[in-house]
Amino acid sequence: MTRIHVQTAAPYEVTVGDGASAQLAAFVAGELRRARKAVVVADSNVAPLHSAAVRSSLSSAGLDVYDFVFPAGERSKNLATYGAVLDFLAANHFDRTDFAVALGGGVTGDLTGFAAATYKRGMAFIQLPTSLLAMVDSSVGGKTGVDLSAGKNLVGAFHQPCAVFCDMAFLSTLPEVWRMDGMGEVLKYAVLGDANLFSKLEKAPLSPIGECAIAGCIGMKRDIVEKDEREGGVRKLLNLGHTFAHAIELLSGYAVSHGRAVATGLAMSSRAAAKMGVLSAADCVRIESLVSAMGYEAHVRFSVDGMADAMLSDKKVSGDAIDLVLPQEIGRCFVRRTPLSDIGKVVSDAF
Ligand SMILES: NC(=O)c1ccc[n+]([C@@H]2O[C@H](COP(=O)([O-])OP(=O)(O)OC[C@H]3O[C@@H](n4cnc5c(N)ncnc54)[C@H](O)[C@@H]3O)[C@@H](O)[C@H]2O)c1
Ligand SMILES: [Zn+2]
């Protein structure tokens, strides 16, 4: 079992390991002893697989446990589902001292976290991530929110969980397409800050990763989030590959999933960085090769103009420039503020 301490304004622990969720009851009995009720929020795929065990451990801690189940998928991450969670809490007389448990992927975590951030001006919530992406990325850092019809994650709040339990056992039921999706973010962490992880992935590009690698990714996210809880500076590094990825997702009509788009975005960022002379040709080839070896596309089929336009419509565009994250070497990246007028050139370099 690995423990990672996150020193944000409200500090918390992330516990990673096989059976980590068994520690939930003890945590609740210790840290949330004033709570009388807990709601387990899960989607329609995860609830039948994993809710019962979580329910029983919360019941064993003496709580009244409620289930809120919503249809699985990004399309549920909206104001209507968010409102339904709030109404459910109110109808069941939840108090500010009670808490919510987000049992699921990033959709469940973001939705539950936002409801917890705002219900009665804030209640505690615990993250029990069940997807690889939620473990290495969305469950840590305190970004919560839902989508609007105008775009993804357009409404939300910063609200840190009071604990995160990454139980490796949950991954045994995760479908392969979603495991692969999460691996796109794992590869991002490797390029961003862990040359050893990168080498390990090169040796076994298709193998499932274990507790140690997952904890390593969480540690990297923790280091960045601690320095910059509200994304004013270094947290932007976590967007490595993402400006390209968001454009790929948009142009594919969201047929290409986020993590796959991130992997392709990594190859594109690397080519752009190599053309600028900030990344060696050798490292660029290693990144492109690993992207392909892990089963992702290293190139896009869209036009340069289409990609450039899609990138300019990204919500991360601020003023007359985009903060592009570029690799300098495997395991080290930097943010380059890029004038919008240069984006066409950057995109053509990235092809
Ligand atoms: N808050 C953040 O910092 C942050 C960071 C990255 C992504 N996100 C958000 O995360 C979301 C994507 O997360 P995701 O990829 O986990 O999506 P998701 O929550 O939709 O989960 C993916 C799919 O896997 C299923 N699933 C999850 N765990 C399972 C398990 N153990 N067994 C069987 N099925 C399981 C889900 O039902 C779903 O169908 C997006 O909405 C994105 O915006 C947030
Ligand atoms: Zn991402």
Image: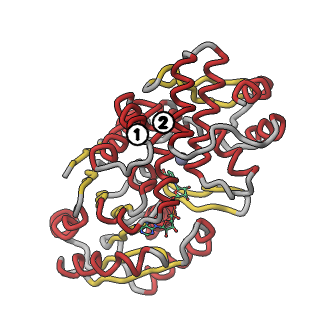
**Apparent side of residue 30 relative to residue 336 in the rendered image (left or right):** left
* Residue 90 locus on image (x, y percent): 45, 81
Horizontal side of residue 38 vs 27, given as left or right: right
Q: Is residue 141 above or below residue 351?
A: below
Q: Residue furthest top?
A: 277
Q: Residue at x 47, y 82 (%)?
A: 88
Query: Residue 53 location, x and y as percent?
Result: 27, 77
Residue for point 57% across, 74% down: 81
Q: Does dot 1 land on a helix, a strand or a loop?
A: helix
Instruction: Give, as a three-letter code, the residue at label 1.
Output: Val
Is residue 124 at least partly visible in the picture? Answer: no
Q: Amino acid at mark 2?
A: Arg
Residue 185: x %, y % from top left: 48, 45
Residue 203 appears in the rendering? yes
What is the x, y in percent for residue 55?
29, 80
User: Which residue in the protein does label 2 denote?
Assistant: 235
Place residue 200 in its image quadrant: top left
Q: Which mark is residue 12?
A: none
Quadrant of residue 193 within the rendered picture: top left
Seen in the image, is 344 located left or right of residue 191? right
Between the residue at mark 2 and the residue at mark 1, the CA separation in whole angstroms equals: 6 Å
Look at the numbered discs 2 and 1 and tell me whether their residues touch, using CB distance below 8 Å. Answer: yes
Disc nearer the start of the sequence (2/1): 1
Residue assigned mark 1: 225
Judged from the image, the secondary structure of the residue bearing numbered disc 2 is helix
| Residue 104 vs residue 124, the one in the foreground | 104
Q: Quadrant of residue 288?
A: top right
